[in-house]
């Protein structure tokens, strides 16, 4: 199957590959996977006090489209607020990378990863507020 | 495609006797071979050729545990593939992320011993999974609901394991060159 130029570019020069400290209070981690193809994707965000995503990292073991989708996702969410990042839809990724129908699930995975990283960060914040209340 | 178990005339079980299945494939292939059917009318030769192709693909499917599990699930009416399978549990995703990262480290250090250790641990994991699946299929006895509950998650895990081994092979080739 032929990959689009943009997929190849992200695959050969993935942006923001790496790890953030998952135990840090300002980091949210999303870990998602597609059992039908054996892909696993981790996407992490570091969020400022103002609720802006200052940094994003990913690590994906999967096909070129899965790597490109997560690489693009980190590029897009950097500098965005959590609320803005949450509105990113997999269809935008499909369009940008020109993904064929059989690879749409890769973009779904990337959207899931963003959402679950945000949810993880928010859960951490809520837990911390709960602790502060008790003090 | 016709059901591979039916094609080879085998009892539909996950714990398949592979030697018996291979023997059945060989016997059928021999009878259906074009050389054996050279004197027959063209329609019969075409039929034999079609059957030969079917027999080959049935054997290919049955000797692969993932395809074999998918065949058995299809027989029971359980849908597999994208959108039909449960989300993998976080513990599995974490395990596979760590396993794949460990492979990346072994690769960058060109450490064949570490690589073999990781592969060996995953082979143990795979054996346990295959045993568990064999039990699940036998005990569910074709019950769709029970099978979906018991077999789908292990099938997903098995696909992650296969991806892992594909990566091990690629690294082994790289280290050998």
Image (spheres, rainbow, N blue to C red):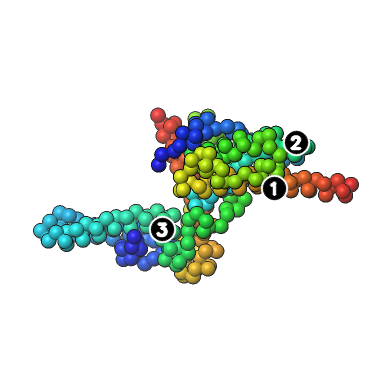
Q: Are marks 3 and 2 on the same chain?
A: no
Residue at which label 3 appears = B68
Q: Which disc number belongs to residue B23?
A: none
Residue at which label 2 appears = A48
Nearer the camera: disc 3 or disc 1: 1
Q: Quadrant of residue A41?
A: top right
Find the distance from the CA under tag 1 to the CA under tag 2: 15 Å
Residue neighbourhood size for the residue with mark 3, other residues' Cα within 10 Å, grouped as few (<14), some (14–19), many (≥20): many
Q: Position of residue B159 (x, y in %)?
A: 48, 50
Residue A38: tell me if it is visible. Answer: no
Of residue B48 and residue A105, the one placed in the foreground of this image is A105
Helix or strand or loop: what does disc 3 sit on?
A: helix
Residue at which label 1 appears = A119
Residue B80 is left or right of residue A121, and the answer is: left
Q: Earlier in the sequence, mark 1 or mark 2?
A: 2
Which of the chains bears the disc numbered 1?
A
| Residue at image point 34% right, 53% down | B60
| Residue at image point 78% right, 37% down | A49
Q: Are marks 1 and 2 on the same chain?
A: yes
């Amino acid at each position: 199957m032929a990959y689009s130029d943009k997929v190849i570019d992200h695959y050969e020069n993935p942006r923001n590959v790496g790890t953030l400290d998952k135990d840090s209070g300002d980091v949210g981690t999303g870990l998602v996977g597609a059992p039908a193809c054996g892909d696993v994707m981790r996407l992490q965000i570091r969020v400022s006090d103002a609720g802006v995503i200052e940094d994003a990292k990913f690590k994906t073991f999967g096909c070129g489209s899965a790597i490109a989708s997560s690489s693009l996702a980190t590029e897009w969410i950097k500098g965005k607020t959590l609320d803005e990042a949450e509105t990113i839809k997999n269809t935008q990724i499909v369009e940008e990378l020109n993904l064929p129908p059989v690879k749409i699930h890769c973009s779904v995975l990337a959207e899931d990863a963003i959402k679950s990283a945000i949810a993880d960060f928010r859960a951490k914040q809520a837990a911390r507020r709960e602790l502060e209340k008790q003090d | 495609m016709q059901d591979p178990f039916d094609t080879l005339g085998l009892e539909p079980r996950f714990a398949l006797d592979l030697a018996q299945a291979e023997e059945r494939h060989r016997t059928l292939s021999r009878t259906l071979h074009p050389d054996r059917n050279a004197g027959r009318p063209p329609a019969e030769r075409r039929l034999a050729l079609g059957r030969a192709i079917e027999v080959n693909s049935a054997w290919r499917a049955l000797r692969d545990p993932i395809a074999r599990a998918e065949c058995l699930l299809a027989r029971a009416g359980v849908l597999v593939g994208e959108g039909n399978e449960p989300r993998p549990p976080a513990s599995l995703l974490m395990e596979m992320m760590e396993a794949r990262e460990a492979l990346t480290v072994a690769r960058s250090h060109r450490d064949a011993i570490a690589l073999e250790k990781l592969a060996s641990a995953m082979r143990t994991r795979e054996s346990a999974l295959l045993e568990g699946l064999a039990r699940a299929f036998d005990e569910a006895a074709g019950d769709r609901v029970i099978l979906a509950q018991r077999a789908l998650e292990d099938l997903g895990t098995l696909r992650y394991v296969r991806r892992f081994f594909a990566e091990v092979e690629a690294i082994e080739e790289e280290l050998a060159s």
